[in-house]
Amino acid sequence: MGNTPCMEATTRDRDGQGSGALADKAQGIKQEYTHGEEKPLGSHLILVVIYNALVGAFFFWRARSGRSFPERVGTADLLVAGVATHKLSRVISKDRVTAPLRAPFTEFQEEGGPGEVEEKPRGTGMRKAIGQLLVCPFCLAQWVATGILAGLAVAPRATRFICSIFAAVTISDFLQIFYKGSEEKLL
């Protein structure tokens, strides 16, 4: 049995090209972009879709619940959330104690800053993409900030308390570094 005209039409895009031609075109774009290096662009796209799906699901759930969002995020909440985002992103991506959570996706390279390690992503495809996300505090910050702000919308008191913990630890970190630097200058 051969393909029917209807089946053939479903395997072609609007320009009349088959899915193989589209895959070839996508591969060509990837090769041009990456200069032949292994970069998990498809897996990165999946992570972007997951992030947006989670945010969309949250907005949908919030709308269906009949509860609105706060009219604005206050300056104090924004500052505490920002400091907490900074610290929690670093705890997830660099902290020595959270290394076992990253280990399936990363590989130890060397000791980092105080209480931190430097790692690199391992594997290919989705494993590498997740590893790249997990070792990058800048990349994680958007995910963390989204979670914190969603928490402020749903459970503001608990979220403020948790954010205050991470903000206090951030202040402590800077004081520890300042103290250590002062101590070394005095000795």
Image (cartoon, grey):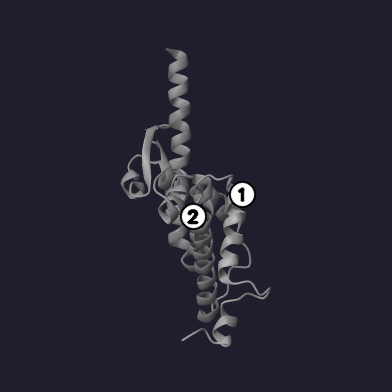
Q: Which residue is mark 1?
A: 33
As helix, strand or loop, the secondary structure at mark 2 comes to helix
Q: Mark 1 to mark 2: distance in Å?
A: 29 Å
What is the x, y in percent for residue 179? 44, 25
Of circles 1 and 2, the one toward us is 1
Q: Secondary structure at mark 1?
A: helix
Disc 2 target residue:
144
Give residue 118's quadrant in the image.
top left
- Does any portion of residue 115 appear in the rendered image? no
Asked if 114 appears above or below 43 in the picture, the reply is above
Whole-percent x and y of residue 16? 66, 75
CA neighbours of label 2 inside 10 A, class few (<14), some (14 to 19), many (20+) = many
Residue type beneath disc 1: Tyr
Camera-side residue: 133 or 113? 133
Give how far across and how far down residue 37 sits, in percent: 53, 44
* Amino acid at the residue labelled 2: Val
The residue lying furthest to the front in this view is 1
Q: Residue at (60%, 66%) from the top-left corner?
A: 22
